[in-house]
Image (spheres, rainbow, N blue to C red):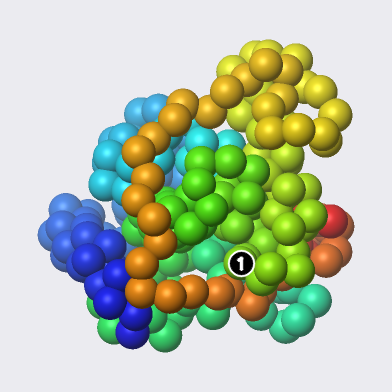
Amino acid sequence: MIQSMKRPLLHLAGLLLISAGLLPAKALARVVSDEAYNGVAPCWQDAAQRYGVPVSLLKAVAQVESSNRARVVARNTNGSLDIGYMQINDWWLPHLQRYGITKTTLLDDACINLNVGAWILKQGIDRYGYNAQGIGAYGAGTDPKKSQVRTTYANKVFRALAQQQGKPVDGDGGGTVGGTAVERVQVAPAKGGDVQSPHRRQQRAVITNSPTTEQLVWSVFD
C-alpha cells in the first residue's frame, strides 16, 4: 500500500470501531440516509473536518453520485460497481478491507461511506489542487487522458453546489457556476505516487424501481 494512504485509512478504521459501538450498522444507515443531507446527523461535519473538505462540497458530490440515497449500487460499463451514498467504486475494496470496511459496510453504514468518499475526494484535491481537475478526479480518476472528463464531472458538482445554495446555474464552461465559489481549503502536494481508480461511467442514469433493499442502478454519469 502507498505510504500516504495509511493515515487517512486509520481514521476510517477508527470511525468504523466507534460507529460499531454506538449503533448496529443497519440502524445507523437508516438514521443517516434519512437525516444526513438535512444536516441533522453529525457525519457531514465529522468527515469535512477529518479530511479538510467543505460540507457543501461533500453534499454536492453526494447529490451527483447517488441523489443522496444510501443503499444503491451502480454497475459501470466496465463491469465495476459503485457502492452506496458516495458511490465508492469496488476498486477501492482491497485497500478498505484491510481496515474492516467491506461492500456491506459501505451499503449499511452511510457515515463510513461518506468518510471514505471524503478521503477519496481529498486525494484528488491533493493531487491537482482545489479546482475542477481536483474535484473531477473523484468521478474520472487520474488518467492524464481524462482531463476533459474530469472537467465535465466537476461541472456537475458545481451545478449541484449552486442548486444547493439557491444560486443560478450557468453552462458547463469554467470552474464556477453562477458565481458560486467553493470554500477554499489548505491542500498539500501529492505524496507517494499515483493512486489511480480505473472505474469510469459512460452511461446515463437509469434508476430502477426495485422491491429489494439494495437497488441496482446504472451509472449516474454521462
Residue on which the image places disc 1? 142
Q: Residues within 10 Å of mark 1 (few under 14, many from 20)?
A: many
Assign the C terminus to one quadrant of the image. Answer: bottom right
What residue do we see at 53% from left, 28% from top? 182
Q: Nearer the viewer, residue 99 or 173?
A: 173
Q: Is 25 situated left or right of 104 in this image?
A: left
Residue 149 location (% of width, % of height): 77, 57
At which x and y percent is residue 166?
65, 14
Residue 153 lies, in percent from the top left, at 72, 49
Q: In which quadrant of the rendered view does residue 146 lie?
A: bottom right
The image quarter containing residue 35 is: top left
Q: Could you say whether the residue bearing mark 1 is in a helix, strand or loop? A: loop
When the figure is inspected, residue 127 is found, relative to residue 46, above or below; the finding is below
Left/right of residue 30 with respect to residue 62 in the rendered view: left
**Which quadrant does the N terminus fall into?**
bottom left
Could you tell whether 213 is left or right of 40 in the image?
A: right
Q: Note whether residue 196 is visible.
A: yes
At horizontal 68% and vertical 27% (from top left) the residue drawn is: 176
**Residue drawn 45% across and 79% down?**
93
Q: Residue at x 63, y 50 (%)?
A: 133
Q: Is residue 63 above or below residue 148?
A: above
Asked whether the viewer can see residue 70, the reply is: no
Three-letter amino acid code at the position of disc 1: Thr
Q: Quick check: 88 above or below 195?
A: above
Q: Residue furthest front?
A: 189
Total residue callouts: 1
Query: Is residue 61 or residue 183 the one in the foreground?
Result: 183
Quadrant position of residue 61: top right
Residue 133, placed above or below residue 76: above
**Residue 143 locus on image (x, y percent):** 66, 71
